[in-house]
Image (spheres, rainbow, N blue to C red):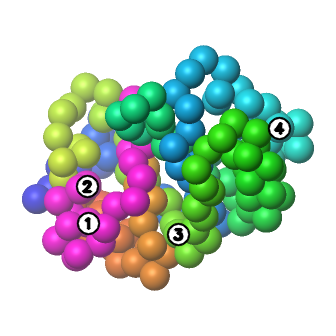
Amino acid sequence: MVINESADMESAIVSGITCDMNEARITLKRVPDQPGVSAKIFGPLAKAEIMVDMIIQNTRSGGETDLTFTVTKDDFERAKEISETVAKEINAEEVLTATEIAKVSVIGLGMKSHSGVAAIMFEALASENINIRLISTSEIRISCVILSKYAELAVRTLHTAFGLDQEK
């Protein structure tokens, strides 16, 4: 399934695939779902000058939410310590972490005006039995967190799915 038929980068739906192996994930489980809680979580991280990348919040029943975010592996230990302290303060149930992850992204200006890019990405990863742990999107980027052992396979698979491995 080829979606990138043009060699012109501005008209390309997907013009590139990136992979970041320097990511770690932190999840606060069963966080109270109320105003100000996110500020209590991310304020101390900002004070510690820890850059947060992806942020995903999942609402649960019973007035709770799970909040997941990624940081660089260099900042992981400090971010984990801060998150554990904050989790106790806000009565979150637990803090879960993962360091053996990678973020793969498809990027393209043409994504703003074309539907189906996410479906192609997800189908391509599924065809190689690569499980997606987190998804984040913007107008020109779709990023998925996967286990790092599948990073190279994911990049090759996505290059093929979007026709980026073809001669121009």
Q: Return the residue at label 2.
A: 121
* Placement of 156 over or under 161, stated as above or below: below
Residue 17 at x, y percent in the picture:
42, 57
- Is 93 or 14 nearer to us in this picture? 93
- Which is more N-terminal, label 2 or label 4? 4
Q: Residues within 10 Å of mark 2 (few under 14, many from 20)?
A: many
Amino acid at the residue labelled 1: Leu
Q: CA distance from mark 1 to mark 4?
A: 35 Å
- Would residue 77 be seen by someone viewing this image from the given angle? yes
Identify the image quadrant of the C terminus: bottom left
Q: Nearer the viewer, mark 1 or mark 4?
A: 4
* Placement of 37 over or under 20, stated as above or below: above
- Would residue 9 be seen by someone viewing this image from the given angle? no
Q: Report the side of 165 relative to 84 (left or right).
A: left
For numbered disc 2, what is the local secondary structure? helix
Check whether the beta carbons of the residues at disc 1 and disc 4 lie within 8 A of each other. Answer: no
For numbered disc 3, what is the local secondary structure? strand
Q: Return the residue at label 3.
A: 101
